[in-house]
Structures are given as C-alpha cells and as structure tokens.
Amino acid sequence: MNLIKVLGILGGVVPWSSILTSIALSPWFNVYDNALSDLGNIGRNSPAAYIFNAGLIVSGVLIMFFALLLSISRRSWEFLIWTIPVFLGAADLALIGVFSEDAGRIHGIVSVIFFALIAITSVIYSYASWPLGSPRIGAVAISFGIASAFVWFVPWPWRGVAIQEAATSLMATAWLVLVSLSLPDSTARGRWIN
C-alpha cells in the first residue's frame, strides 16, 4: 500500500478516534443538545478538548498531504479539480481544531466552510469520476454531496447539530476511504482500479 493511500485512510479514521474518545471522557455531552465542537471547548471540556482538537488538526494535516501528493503524482485536471478543494477542506478541518469553540466567531466560520466544502467536493468529484475511470465512486460521491446538503437544510426536532455534523463527516470519511483504497498502488499516472 502506498503512502498516498495510507494518508487518505488515516486522515479519515483519525478524527473519529479523537471524537469518540472525547465523547467517552465527556459524560455531559448529548448528541441531541450539543455540537461536536462543544467537545473541543477548552474552557468547558479540558482535558478531553485537547484530544478532540488534536484529532482534527492531525487529520487535517494528513488529508492535506494526501491531496498534495496525489496532485503532484497525477498532474491532470481530473485530479486537480477535486484535490484542490480536498486540500482546502482539510486545511479548514485543521483550523476547526486550532480555532476551537472558545475562539469565538472564527470557529463558526471555519466550521461552516468545512461542511460546505464536503458537499461541494463530492459534487466536483462525481463530475471528474468518469474521466478518472471511477464512476461507481462518483455515484457514491454525488449521493453523499446531495445528502450532506439535505442534512443541513432540513429542520430536525433536536436542538444541537452533532447528528448533522456526524452524518456529514461520516459520509466524507466513507468517500475518502473509498477513493484511497481505489487508487492504483503505483504512483505513476493511470486510471483507477474499478
């Protein structure tokens, strides 16, 4: 398995280990009343907040390297069109951890941008999936992109947004892992394996 695949898979898995650990260390947390970012509030949830924020930062950096190395190894529009927004979304994910909930308004801004980029990147990838030779993953991506937008624009009967955040993030994780696993083992230019 090559480095790019490993970076993509780890980038998708790392934040969930920190999120679940933070939830386990935060008995007050309720998915119906809170946002996942409440777990990263250093003033309210220390030391679990450091685990949560570190997981987001590490994941963001891993995914940034995934997108950067993939862009460099596959210099074509079919990759650049979606690896650039992946890179930006990953940078934004890291910023959510850097500017935790106690940072104020900036946290809300980077969070909104991150979740919007998930939907946008999914749709862009689905467009590029045919020339890439990965139309099945493209179909998954467009489904996830539409579902991500749907999750945020439908009124739900609970007060918090942790469920919407988790649903959107799980779809992004599944897509990232699918893309990573489908990459050819060679770093040479080539089509997907499916």
Image: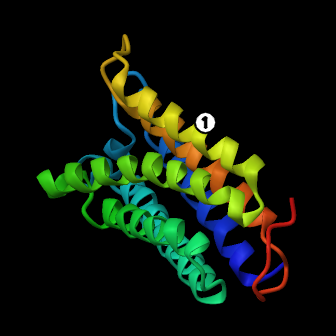
| Kind of residue at disc 1 | Ser
Which residue is at a point 65% across and 51% down the rendered structure image? Answer: 175
* Outermost top residue: 157
Which quadrant: the N terminus? bottom right
Left/right placement of residue 64 relative to residue 130 reads: left
Name the residue that disc number 1 marks.
143
Q: Residue at x 79, y 79 (%)?
A: 190
Camera-side residue of 96 and 5: 5
174 to 76, vertically: above or below: above
**Residue 7 in the image: x percent, y percent?**
65, 74
Of all residues shown, which one is farthest toward the front?
131
Q: Is residue 187 above or below residue 183?
A: below
Where is residue 74, by image quadrant? bottom right
126 to 166, vertically: above or below: below
Viewer-side residue, 15 vs 111: 111
The crowd level at tag 1 (other Cα within 10 Å; few <14, some 14-19, many 20+) is some
- In this view of the protein, can residue 104 be seen by the observer? no
* Residue located 39% across and 41% down the image: 36
- Image colouring: rainbow
